[in-house]
Amino acid sequence: MKTSSKRPKMKRPAPVTDLLTALLRGTPAELRLKEGRIWEVWDEAVGSKIALHAQPASFREGTLTLHVDSSPWLQQLTYLKKDLIAKVNEALDEELVKEIQLKGGKVRSAAAKPQQAPKRRKLSEDEQAWIKEQAETVTDPELRAVFESLIRKDKEHQDKG
């Protein structure tokens, strides 16, 4: 008699963003993560023409403050506030922005230089051993490898001290 030894399918690891969202649900940090998305969606939500002249500077209690690079654009955007609010909230799939405040200020260039990769340093044997030791506390092998990689990258970007 042959017995079938079917193994249960292993679940795919959850994306880190899903884990963070679940971990932070109901905390003030959850709201900060949502608010941070405003900067991510801004250029696409309002279009390149507006994004070239106005950029988010801060967000507090439903009010998005924009830096605008010139007086004519300040005036023009005054008339477009409701449209901008609607476009940003639509891109966020949530009504976070209730009001827009406009201020004169510097605006980053839309064709900003690509960010250079941060410099990494070579880790000492002691640091590598410490990283392995920290990662050993995680029982799941895949999660342990990710955790170890994150610690290693963090250490490589820190000044030795």
Image (cartoon, helix red, strand yellow):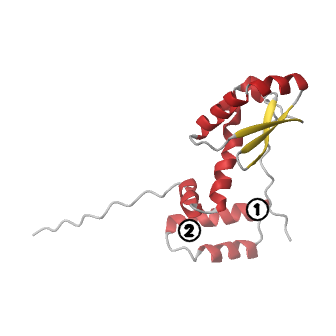
Classed neighbour count for the residue bearing mark 2: other residues with Cα under 10 Å, few (<14), some (14–19), many (≥20):
some
Question: Which amino acid does the dot numbered 2 rest on?
Answer: Arg
Residue 16, percent from left and from top: 57, 56
Where does the image place residue 79, in percent across and percent down from the top left? 76, 24
Marks 1 and 2, how far apart at CA: 18 Å
The image position of residue 35, as x and y in percent, is: 68, 48
Q: Which residue is mark 2?
A: 144
Q: In the picture shown, does residue 97 fall above or below 154?
A: above
* Contact, mark 1 vs mark 2 (Cβ under 8 Å): no
How far from the left and from the top, in percent, is residue 129?
A: 69, 76
Pick the quarter of the image with the N terminus: bottom left
Up/down of 33 relative to 7, above or below: above
Residue shown at 71% from the left, 32% from the top: 43
Label placed on residue 156: 1
How many other residues sit within 10 Å of disc 1, few (<14), some (14-19) or many (≥20)?
some
Along the line of sight, the residue nearer the viewer: 25 or 62:
62
Q: Residue at x 90, y 25 (%)?
A: 71
Q: Is residue 147 left or right of residue 67?
A: left
Circle 1 SS class: helix
* Among the 4 quarters of the image, the one containing residue 109: top right
